[in-house]
Amino acid sequence: MKRVVFNQKGGVGKTTIVCNLAAIAASRGLRTLVIDLDTQGNASQYLMGPNAAPPDKTVADFFDSALSFSLAAPPFASFASETGHDNLDVIAASPRLDELVVKLEAKQKIYKLRDALRKLKGYDAVFIDTPPALNFFSRSALIAADRVLIPFDCDEFARQALYTLLENLHELRADHNEDLMVEGIVVNQFQSRSKLPQRLVEELRAEGHPVLGQTLSSSVKVKESHEHHRPLIWEDPRHRVTQEYLALFKALGD
């Protein structure tokens, strides 16, 4: 299963959701790969830690190889690095992604990630982290994925951005990936005691949008997990937010 977590709005928890769902998959014995397409590289840092040796290859090297004609292109798995966590690898981000965009778009390489993932062997689950923009790399991820999860934080600006996002996804599905399934909207940093978040979620559901039943709470434990570079399933398995992630993972299924 290939999942992408995407929202054009920043600060909604894409990276945290990607890394924690991937960590749960790995903890369940699934050979799991995270692909970090955000030049900030937060997913790579979260999973590998600040003291890890620089990866031999990054996702920029993959896209760089897509620009050169070769009869023997390196397998996609060769760009992966170990994270230090069992069953969990990452294809790390790189600032060089920004330098490659113009060339990749000019040579129409938007399907290269899809083609590489179709040939990928040795992994049971793939999670893709994306930049907070509908650019070449997020489009590549959406074209390559089977399912998309949409993080949503509860405010009016986020709701208006969500409507635009859903329209963009509808267009992308029609033009590039009719098999892409919007798996659901994940309500993140949810404050159950506040009236506004509850009202926004209820209104979205009443409008027929696929808001998932499992919400994710706001907690300092998540920030501690970032600081320690340990996803929640390893940072604090019994914590309330960890249990919410486990329930979300179970609800998503295979």
Image (cartoon, rainbow, N blue to C red):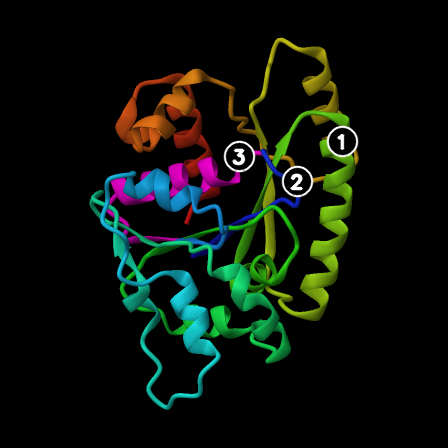
Measure how far apart labels 3 and 1 are at the Cα level: 16 Å
Q: Residue at x 22, y 42 (%)?
A: 85
Vertical position of residue 105 compared to residue 15: above or below: below
Residue furthest to the bottom? 71
Q: Which residue is mark 1?
A: 157
Q: Is residue 214 left or right of residue 245?
A: right
Residue type of the residue flagged with mark 3: Gly
Q: In which quadrant will I find the N terminus?
A: bottom left
> Magenta region: which residues?
12-34
Real-space CA distance between mark 2 and mark 3, rounded to the nearest whole angstrom: 10 Å
Question: Does residue 166 belong to the magenta stretch?
Answer: no
Q: Secondary structure at mark 2?
A: loop
**Amino acid identity at mark 1:** Phe
State the residue position of label 2.
Answer: 9
Residue found at x 69% / y 18%: 198
| Quadrant housing residue 149 | top right
Q: How far from the left and from the top, in percent, is residue 19?
A: 39, 40
Q: Is residue 54 above or below residue 84?
A: below
* Circle 2: residue type: Lys
* Badge count: 3
To which residue does mark 3 refer? 13
The kind of secondary structure the magenta stretch mainly shows is helix
State the SS at label 3: loop
